Amino acid sequence: MKKQMAAAVVISAMAAVSLAGCGGSAAKTAGTAAAETAAQAAAGSTAGEKASAGAEGGKTFKVGIVQYMDHPSLNQIEENIESELDKLSSDTGVAYDYKSYVKNGQGDASTLNQIASDLIAQDVDVLVPIATPAAQICQSAAEGKNLPIVFSAVSDPVGAKLVNSLDAPGANITGTSDPINVEALINMILAVNPDTDYIGLLYSKSEDSSTKAIEDAKAYLDEKGIKYIEKTGTTTDEVASAADALVAEGVDAVFTPTDNTIQKAELSIFEKFNKAGIPHYAGADSFALNGAFCGFGTDFAELGRVTADMVADILGNGADPASTAVKAMDDGIATINTDTCAELKLDINTVKDAVKPFCTSVEEIQTQKEFQK
C-alpha cells in the first residue's frame, strides 16, 4: 500500500511540474522536484505524515529561527513568533521547540550562511528566516532538501525571487510579507507640509526589500512633479554620511522604505534631521521608536504571530508550502514620534489630523531603543 501511495505521489508531482513555468529561483526543474517527491514518499516523511505523527503521538517539531540582525522590528517579530509557538504548543499538544535553534546573523552574509547550514545539519523541521536577506540565504542553503521555509517580514517576495507568486509560491517556501504603501506615505508627507518640493530618498542598495519601494517612490514623485535625490549606505557610518549629505542638500523631508540597514542606523541619524528641521518618514514603527518623525506600515507583533501560525499549519496540519499563499500584511498604521514632533515645532494634533486620511490608525510613540514587552 505504501509503495502504491509513493508511486501515485511521484506521478502526480511529475505531472504538476510539467505544467509549471520557469518562475525564477523559486521554481524547480522537473527532475529535481520528482526526485525530491520520490524521496519523501519512499521515506514516509511527507509534511502530511509528519503532521499526523505530531497530532497522534505528541510529536516535537524543531523550529529554526534565523534573524537577519538586531533591530526593534525584527526583535519584535522574533519575540512574537516564539510566544505564539509557546501558545500553540500548550493549546494543541504538538510541541514546537525553538529554544535551541534561534540564531542571529547580525547582518553578516557569511554568518547567516553558516547558521542556515548548521540548522539544516541539526535536522530542524522548518527554517523561519526573518527579513529578506535571511530568507534568500536560507532558500539557497536548503536547495534540493525536503525542508519547508516560512519567512517573515519580506517586503517583496516575488521581486526577491523567493516565490513565483504570492498566491502560489511554487516551491517549499512561503511566509508573511510587510509591503509598504509608498503613495500613502508620500501623501502624508505632502499633507503635513504642502510646500514640500524636494525629498531625499535614503536606503541601502544592498537590500532587495528596498528596490521596488524606491522605484515606486520615484515614479510617484515624478508624477507629482516633485524633485528628489537618492543617498545610500550599507554601514551605519555610510548611512550617517548619507544623512549629512541630505541635510546639506536642504531637502524638505526624507523617505526610507522598510530598510533594515537604515533602521539599524536610525539612532545615529535622527538628531541630524531634527536639528535641520527635516522630518524622516519610514516604512516601520521601529524607525519612529528610534527617533524618526513617522513610521508607517505593518503591525510587526501581529506579523510574528501569523508567521508562527503558518509554521504550525505546515508542520502540525500538513499544509503544503508550495500552495500556501504568502500573507501580505499592510496594516497602514502611522506612528508619530512625539519627541521629534515637538523638536520639529509641529503640533501633534495637527499632524494626526493631516495623516488620518491616508492610514488606518495613528499612534504616538516616544524615542526609545527597544519596544517595551
Image (tube, helix red, strand yellow):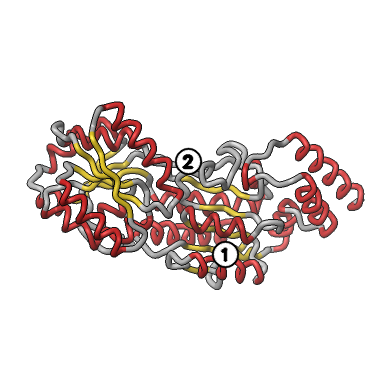
Q: Residues within 10 Å of mark 2 (few under 14, many from 20)?
A: some
Up-down relation of residue 188 to residue 106 (above or below): above
> In terms of depth relative to the viewer, which is nearer, 111 or 9?
111
Q: Amino acid at mark 1?
A: Gly
Instruction: List x then y, in percent, for residue 57.
Output: 72, 62
**Residue at x 53%, y 70% (from the top left corner):** 99
Determine whether, in the image, residue 106 is placed left or right of residue 42: left
Badge 2 element = strand
Determine whether, in the image, residue 349 is placed left or right of residue 213: left
Residue under circle 1?
Answer: 64
Examine the image and state in which quarter residue 21 appears: top right
In terms of sequence position, does the residue under pointer 2 or pointer 1 come before the other? 1
Examine the image and state in which quarter residue 251 appears: top left
**Residue at x 23%, y 45% (from the top left corner):** 254
Determine whether, in the image, residue 170 is placed left or right of residue 339: right
Instruction: List x then y, in percent, for residue 287.
Output: 28, 53
Examine the image and state in which quarter residue 361 appears: top left
Is residue 138 something one can see in this rendering? yes
Up-down relation of residue 373 to residue 341 (above or below): below
Q: Amino acid at mark 2?
A: Ala
Badge 1 element = strand
Q: Residues within 10 Å of mark 1 (few under 14, many from 20)?
A: many
Residue under circle 2?
Answer: 328
Is residue 365 something one can see in this rendering? no
Instruction: List x then y, in percent, for residue 71.
Output: 36, 61
